[in-house]
Amino acid sequence: MASELRDPLIDRLAADLQPVRPRLPWRDAALLLTLIVVEVAVYIWIRGMRPDMPLAMGRMAFWWKAASLCVLAAIGAATALAAFDPTRSPRRGLRGFAIAAAVAIAIGWGIDAASHGSAELIARLDWREGLRCVFAVVVLSLPALLALGILMRRGAPTDPGGTAAAVGLTAAAWGGAVFVVACPHDDPLYVALWFSVAIAIVAWAARLILPRLTRW
């Protein structure tokens, strides 16, 4: 008797269900790659490249900055996309991100020691320019933050806090990588400080906001 009453109820509940397209990580990655290509193109069209780009491309510090941010963005994206799956945890990827950041800073320290010597610390940090860089990186991280936030909402992360942190770190590193084409500063000390501040701000904001919007 109970079975006869339950079956029509189940049928009614299931009547309006629509098939769900399974998540494909490669499709999400392709979407993100397309977005960054478009963002770089639009940013160059609006802002233009730094005037001394040909000269900057001859410096090791420029390539260190660009490569470090791209590697961090790639590690963060791989971590976030994997964590959208309920069977995966972002913790290992976050540790990898931290290790990669430490290695990048160590390499930058080596470049810095070889090229700047005892230059005045305050002049090198240039806090006014630094705050402008922080603002630019935060703004440029917003498209990636929005895209990853939507993908996170469509996923089913079992560690929302860690996944949100991975999203924020990815978006900030992405924003920094885009800003490389216009940022006039290659000093490793300057880059390590101000880009780290921008990354921390975006990661903190993502960690605070996204878990509230993506509960399932």
Image (cartoon, grey):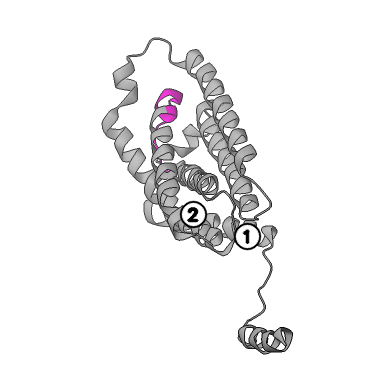
Query: Could you say where residue 185 lies in the image, as x and y percent from the top left?
Result: 40, 32
Q: Is residue 134 above or below residue 102?
A: below
Front residue of this view, candidates 38 and 87: 87
Type of amino acid under label 1: Asp
Against 79, is 86 above or below?
below
Name the residue at 52% across, 62% down: 153
Residue 28 is tagged as 1
Q: Which residue is mark 2?
A: 144
In three-dimensional space, the C-alpha distance between marks 1 and 2, rounded to whole angstroms, equals 12 Å
Whether residue 53 is visible to the viewer of this picture, yes or no, is yes
Q: Position of residue 174 (x, y in %)?
A: 50, 46
Res 21 → quadrant = bottom right
Residue type at the position of mark 2:
Ala
Q: Quadrant of the C terminus?
A: bottom right
Task: Tell whether 182 sits left or right of 99.
Answer: left
| Total numbered labels | 2
